[in-house]
Image: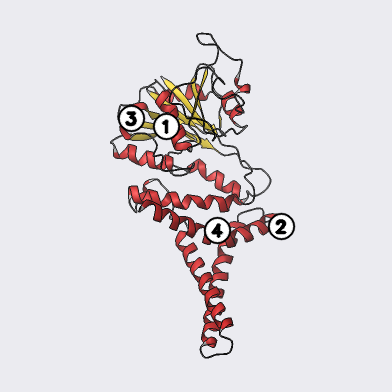
Amino acid sequence: MITVVIPTIGRPSLAETLAALDADLDVVVVDDRGGGEATGRGAGPRGAATPGLPGLEAAGPPVSPGGTGRGIRVVRSGGRGPAAARNAGWRVAETPWVVFLDDDVVPAPGWGRALREDLTGLPEDVGGSQGRIEVPLPEGRRPTDAERHTAGLANAEWITADMAYRRAALEATGGFDERFPRAYREDADLALRTLAAGYRLVRGRRVTRHPIRDDGPWASVRRQRGNADDALMRRVHGPGWRAAVGGDRGRLRGHALTTGLGLLSLLAGGLAVSGGRGRGTGGLRAAAAVAGAGWLALTAEFAWSRIAPGPRTTEEIGWMTVTSVLIPPVACARRLGGELRVRR
């Protein structure tokens, strides 16, 4: 009845994900590490196609074709991103339902039973069922900016950290749009297309835990790559796509204003310096000062909005200050690049 599909790039956390699954579940692990040739069919028992994939060795004793015990099929998607990896996984499944899990989540005890209860007896017009995501935050202190970002997954709509789709709905929509190259917006896009195809999406009772992981101090800057994917979402689903998936407006407009003021201050200041004491340089200096003050005020507001809810340690304040300077121009550059790509 159910196949569990888990795309991975080889993170060790895959072991804990697999260990939490019932042994009688059909599991497809999609190896999306680059450097390998994609396969369109199952690769047989666990580990047969991709030796050395972290996490598989901890999933239990090997099985032979026709033997007993847990069998985990492995397919390769050639490093083309999570959308392509999930497509490779569900297309080798032969069950009416396909459940997508990320390789860094941990299904709660009894998840397999709860999953069957969630899916059994659903009307044919229900195309998908989302699990309930829990993000355990540290006790005894306020969460950091990165931890709050992860905690937001608990209220996100239709994310593939734990999302089941009826195979018929996947076939009707064509599955995930592989133009989304990273783990961002590809799940929201599929949900909107599933709804547009006439299906309903519901929330189940099963629970999956999404642990906090340390992606380093530059993670918030790297996440700005997602602005390019927002451009594709707008192109495909129109300007109302954010509201349709329960998202907020974001800060891109504020980032654009901050970046514009910063550039204006630099340009006016540069022209004033090159002009020496010539006519008009006083106005340029004034423009540079006003624009610079605006940039500083907006940057300070952005930084404080990230610092205030957090632990306010010296390290956190330092990194929030540095990254708050970088995020606005990086976000704008990523969005501009995305807009140019979708218009080609």
Q: What residue is drawn where x is 47% and y is 30%?
A: 38
Work out how far the residue at label 3 is from the one at label 2, CA to CA, in angstroms. Answer: 51 Å
Q: Residue at x 41, y 47 (%)?
A: 246
Residue 97, located in which quarter of the rendered image? top left
Tell me which label, 3 or 2, sits earlier in the chain.
Answer: 3
Real-space Cα distance between discs 2 and 4? 20 Å
Mark 1 or 2: in front is 1
Q: Position of residue 11 (x, y in %)?
A: 60, 34
The amino acid beneath tag 4 is Ile
Alpha carbon separation for disc pair 3 and 4: 38 Å
Gap in Å between the C-alphas at discs 1 and 3? 10 Å
Mark 3, Cα crowd under 10 Å, few <14 / some 14-19 / many 20+, is few
Q: Residue furthest left?
A: 198
- Which residue was labeled with disc 1? 87
Amino acid beneath label 2: Thr
Query: Which kind of residue does numbered mark 3 sit on?
Result: Glu
Question: Do the residues under discs 3 and 4 have CB atoms within 8 angstroms?
Answer: no
Mark 3 sits on what residue? 171
Image quadrant occupied by the N terminus: top left
Residue marked by disc 2:
314
Locate residue 87, reporting x and y percent: 42, 32
x then y, percent, for residue 122 = 35, 26
As helix, strand or loop, the secondary structure at mark 4 comes to helix
* 196 w.r.t. 5: above or below: below
Q: Earlier in the sequence, mark 4 or mark 1?
A: 1
Of the residues under marks 1 and 2, which one precedes in the sequence? 1
Crowding near the residue tagged with mark 4, few <14, some 14–19, many ≥20 C-alpha atoms within 10 Å? many
Local secondary structure at mark 2: helix
What residue appears at the point 50 percent right and 8 percent down from the top-left corner?
66
- Whether tag 2 and tag 4 are in contact, CB under 8 A, the answer is no
